[in-house]
Amino acid sequence: MDEKIRERDALTDTEDGEDMTSSKNGGIIRSILIQGDGGSSPNDGATVEIAIKGMYKGRIFDTRDLKFDLDYGLEYDIVSGIEKALRKFKCGEKSLLMLSPKYAFGTTGSEIYNIPADATVQYEVQLFNFLKAKEHWDMGPSEKLELAMKQKDHGTFLFKRDCVAKALRMYKKAVKSLEYSPGYTEEESKLRESYLLSLHLNCALCLLKLESWNGAVDSSDMALQIDSINEKALFRKAQALLGRKDYEEAISNFQKLVSHYPTNQAAHNGIISAKQLVKRERLKLKNHYNGMFEKFAKKDEQKETLDKSRSSINDEPIGYWSNEMADGMISLHQEMEAFGEKMPEKSTGGGNSSPKH
């Protein structure tokens, strides 16, 4: 069969497939080719054995068998759409996946596979076997420490690949792996604390890169709860405060950092930058209020001029009359008639008329 026909048939199949995204945005469409055994599906961290075949416009660009742990697929050049889909696969299942750019190679594409930016690709995926990962509540302290270190290392791998949001999620998973865990030995407790310190610092760094200032402050504070004068924690908190324009508080944190680490030049520079920003904000505020006062002064001046013009008639002497005052006035006869009254008749006699009885 011609490859273009195969691609067309595959596209037709996926149009009637299942949308596997939680938001139902059409980013991952699955069409089952071979049903699985109907049992359970892989969980986070499960070890999976799969075969994949990647296709783009009729060209096969990737075909291989591999074994890896879910959540760590990027280390094996497995796109996120495959990992998300595998969490709903059954053992033995073979499906065709249509992946939008968001779940494939994104806005950058792939040089290795010669995939352009913003490309929709297809993968034929078969799940041969999998081993579920232990849940946290089934793990002992040493297993949790081992898992947290693995998650931390993968987060650092993602961070170096500039996948900052994914790295942050992995660091947070590692933190969760170490929460609410009784039964640690004294040595394990110290190791756990050092892991948590490092993870909170890494979270703060990711949040700074993502310009999530409040989150960066919170993560820095978590680190400072473990080590109250930690150099990186103080610096990252000050940077976050600077980012959210809490300049005075940022200066205070930079100064605290300098008091403990006098040779930290970045902290000295931070104080200078923060003070300049404070000065700029104050000048901006001053100019703003000066502008407002000028507007108010002009309005007061205009109102005063208007009030003077309106009250000029009251400045004339009592009894003063001008023709302009009579403009628009009606005659006394017209005014009396308008109110149904009559003008008094002139007396015809030489004296006062006596009242009629």
Image (tube, rainbow, N blue to C red):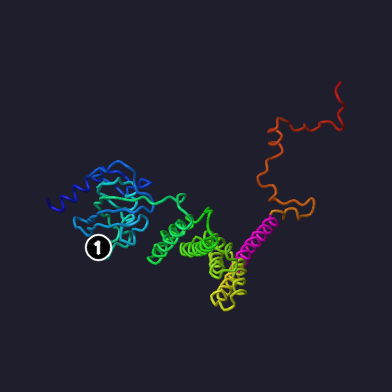
Q: Position of residue 130 (x, y in %)?
A: 31, 50
**Residue at the location (46% across, 63% down)?**
206
- Per the image, label 1 sits on a secondary structure element best described as loop
Give the amino acid at mark 1: Tyr
Tell me, yes or no, if residue 328 can be seen here: yes
Outermost bottom residue: 263
Q: Determine which residue is flagged by label 1.
A: 113
Q: Is residue 220 left or right of residue 300?
A: left
**Camera-nearest residue between 22 and 149:** 149
Which quadrant of the structure image shows residue 56? Answer: bottom left
**Camera-nearest residue between 208 and 224:** 224
111 over 102 or under it: above or below: below
The region drawn magenta spans: 283-309
200 over 131 or under it: above or below: below
Outermost top residue: 357
Tell me, yes or no, if residue 244 can be seen here: no
Chief secondary structure of the magenta span?
helix
**Residue at the location (27% across, 61% down)?**
116
Q: Residues within 10 Å of mark 1 (few under 14, many from 20)?
A: few
267 over 165 or under it: above or below: below
Which quadrant of the structure image shows residue 265? Answer: bottom right
**Residue at the location (16% across, 53% down)?**
4
Queried whether the magenta region covers residue 57, the answer comes back as: no
Q: Position of residue 320 (x, y in %)?
A: 77, 52
